[in-house]
Structure formats: structure tokens, C-alpha cells
Image: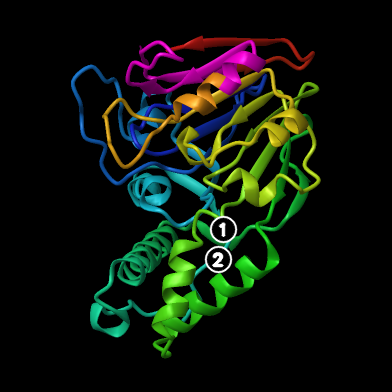
Amino acid sequence: MLEVFFCNVGDGDAVLVRERGEDGRDYAVLVDAGRPFVESRDGSLRKDALEYLLDRQVTHLDRMILTHPHIDHVGGAARIVRAIRVDRLQMLTVPPEDARFVPRSFISTKKPPNGLRQMLNILKELCEAAQERGTAVETIQAGEQALTDRLTMTVYYPRAEIVDRQKQVFDALYRGDAVEEGLCTQVAKERNLSSLMLRFAYGHRSVLITGDRYAADWEGEAIPPCDILKLPHHGDRKSMTPGLLNKLSPWCAVVSCENDPNAKKERPDEEIMTMFLERLPLVLCTENRPMAALAESTTNGIRFDIQPDGAVTCRRE
């Protein structure tokens, strides 16, 4: 059986994909790790990603995959690496072996490039912790690979120019080379577009995890339909287009979002939710404030169990 558990980490992403082995040997992948610490909120059951793993008696991850370098996706990774065994830590752009911490004065006082500097240092600290714990730190490869006899994973890269530009700037900053402020700003703002997307297939069913890559950026790519879709960017206005939804044709959509109102971030977006509810039999949120299109929900997370024959059960936990 394959368990896919969308954790309620508030404003962030963490998805556990675990094949339960008949011999007691599980194969577990964590996609993203939420924020460093998840603050409690009234009416919310949100928790840190590490808490979910320990609650579910996961003390060993075969892989932890980080879709892109934003704090709500990678911030909790270091605590996990230090607390439990992780065999492989995989991402798109890995710090080089001679990477140094990037000082504040080296880039800019402006928010986008300085935010990028902070994230690069978080990633360096994470990779150091992983290496101390014996975790292999790897650049993930695009394409399909078999994880077990029944479970496969297909990795979709972002656009080549995004990949090349990110690696160029990351490596230069880690080495201490000068990088033009405008280029740093561009790469900082492209981090959602640099998201890896992952398709897990098991029992003739598939789950597509999209990071935060805006729909308009990949709707023209040859990505096959899926059964369960994790919306990018927490279901905001950029997360989906009608054409891409038609092409993917899922029967279920999951949105990772929080119940805190934020005037700057409509997550999930009501028009997007209305579009999904009109076309799909099942639309679920890890949590959300009340909307006309979607009733308020408070859960620890959303779990799908997929059997080898393709049968699927879903429940809130």
C-alpha cells in the first residue's frame, strides 16, 4: 500500500509518500519540510513537519526532496536531518563543496537579493548538518526512476534557462564572486518558477506534486494526466489555468494553505476554488478560513491510501 499524507504545516508544504512494505520495511519520501517552526493558531491543528513524522513513527527517510528554496518549503529540513535518519537529501541546486556563507554586506540591503542571501545560508547550514549525519546531498536528476518494485517517481525540471541562471548565481555567491544586484534580484524572484515537480505512480494511480511553479509557466509542457493534484503556490490566483486543469484531469485536488487571513495573499483564491469545485468531485485543503466556495476545515492533514490494484481511500486526520 502507498500512503500519501499532506501535512498541515500552516503556510507551507510537507508531503509524506510512504510505501508500506509487507515485510515491515517501508520506503519513505518526504517532499518539502515546511517552515523552521510552525506557530500555533486558534482553530488550527497545524504542526511542524518533524512532529508529523514522529507521530507517524517515521524515524527513517529514504529521501527528502526539496522542490525549491523558499523558507516555507525547506525551513524545517535541518531539524528533520538532525533528528532522524535521512539517506538522501535531494534538490535542484546543491551548494558546491567549497561553499562559504554569504555575508549580508556582500549583496544588497534590498529585500529580494538579501532574502536570497539568507536562503543560501540556510541551505548551506542544512547541507552541513546532513553531511555530519551521513546523509548524501545530491542534485536530483530529471526523468523517471523506480523507487521500489511498485513505486516510480518522475522528476520534472523547470525551464533550462531558469536552472542555468540559478546555478550560476548560487555558485558565484557561495564562492564569494561579485554578482550584479539586478541578476540576484531576478534569480530571487524566479524561485517559484524554479520548483521541481514530482509525479509518483503506484497501482495505476498517480500523484502530482507541483511545488510553487505558476501554472502559466508549465501548461505547455508534456506532463501526463494525474489522479491527485497538489496545487502549486497554495492555490492562489497563479496556481492553475482552465487549460492546464483540463489537460491534467485529476479527480482530486489538494491545497496546502492556512486559516490566517492575509490581505496580500489570497490562499486559496476563491475563483480558483470555484473552478475546481465545478469540475472535480473532490477538493480538499489542509486548512482554510471560511469561503463562499469552500467550507472551513481544520485537520492534521489529508491522507490517501492507494492499494496495488488501484483502489484509493481518502480521509482527513
Q: Which residues are magenta?
A: 275-304
Question: Taking 32 as reference, is 313 left or right?
Answer: right
Residue 213 to residue 132: above or below:
above
Q: Position of residue 128 (x, y in %)?
A: 39, 65
Residue 138 to residue 220: above or below:
below
Residue designated by label 1: 194
Residue type beneath disc 2: Thr
Question: Taking 261 as reference, is 229 left or right?
Answer: right
Residue designated by label 2: 93
The structure residue drawn at horizontal position 53% and vertical position 67%, both measured from the top left corner, is 94
What element does badge 2 sit on? loop
- Which label was assigned to residue 179? none
Residue 104 to residue 209: above or below:
below
The structure residue drawn at horizontal position 40% and vertical position 10%, both measured from the top left corner, is 295
Q: Position of residue 76 (x, y in %)?
A: 35, 46
Question: Taking 163 as reference, is 263 left or right?
Answer: left
- Neighbourhood count class around disc 1 (C-alpha, 10 Å): few under 14, some 14–19, many 20 upward: many
The structure residue drawn at horizontal position 49% and vertical position 47%, both measured from the top left corner, is 86
Residue 279 to residue 166: above or below:
above
